[in-house]
Image (cartoon, rainbow, N blue to C red):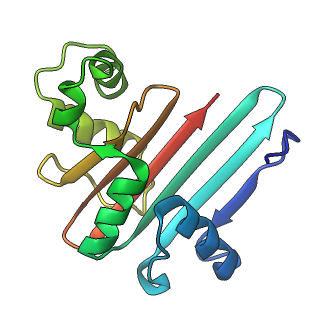
Amino acid sequence: MRKYDGIEVRYRSPETDLAKSLQVIDNLLGFAPEPQQLDFDLSFWAGGSGVYDKLVISCSATPEQWQILKQKLDLYSPEDALARDDWRDDFIWLVADDEVCSDILAASAQFINDNKAPFQDACLDSHTLYFSDMSDVNGWTAVWGQGSRLNYAYFCQG
């Protein structure tokens, strides 16, 4: 249970307790990445005005770990998000700022690049690219990468 005490809880590489950080990351991703190729900045805040979390991770991942993450977070490609009547409008609003969107992959990649951490890989529309189910302007998860490199970004304001 979260305490709404207005105190930020933060785990950031390399300056935090790695064992505790790996537990938090394992809980988020469904697996603990190899520490040698791991960068992260996890900021959790809850106070009188609500919740503000911003979590970013970059790590190596096997194909099996990609699948674990895809299932755990209920991830969809941008094209799949557009195909869903119950999500399409909110998704376009998220990645294209409520504009007409002629290229959902380019808009999604630009959204990620605008919101990623400096240590995370730039997102290209040719990368593997997913968003969690029903991501919208108040809470979203994006996962992208190429080959064995995985990047994760989560934002929640509520």
Number of disc labels: 0
From the viewer's perspective, is 21 left or right of 120? Answer: right
Residue visible at 57% across and 63% down in the picture: 27
Residue visible at 54% across and 69% down in the picture: 26
Q: Is residue 156 above or below residue 64?
A: above
Observer-nearest of 53 and 29: 29
Q: Is residue 70 above or below residue 6?
A: below
> Image quadrant of residue 14?
bottom right
| Image location (x, y in percent) of residue 133 | 37, 37
In the picture as drawn, the residue positioned furthest to the bottom comes out as 36
Residue visible at 79% across and 48% down in the picture: 1
Observer-nearest of 142 and 16: 142
Residue visible at 74% across and 29% down in the picture: 50
Classify the position of the C terminus by image quarter.
top right
> Image quadrant of residue 85?
top left
Q: Is residue 47 above or below residue 130?
A: above
| Image location (x, y in percent) of residue 152 | 41, 56
> Image quadrant of residue 5?
top right
In the picture as drawn, the residue positioned furthest to the right comes out as 5
| Image location (x, y in percent) of residue 47 | 82, 35
| Image location (x, y in percent) of residue 76 | 27, 42
From the viewer's perspective, is 118 left or right of 112? Answer: right
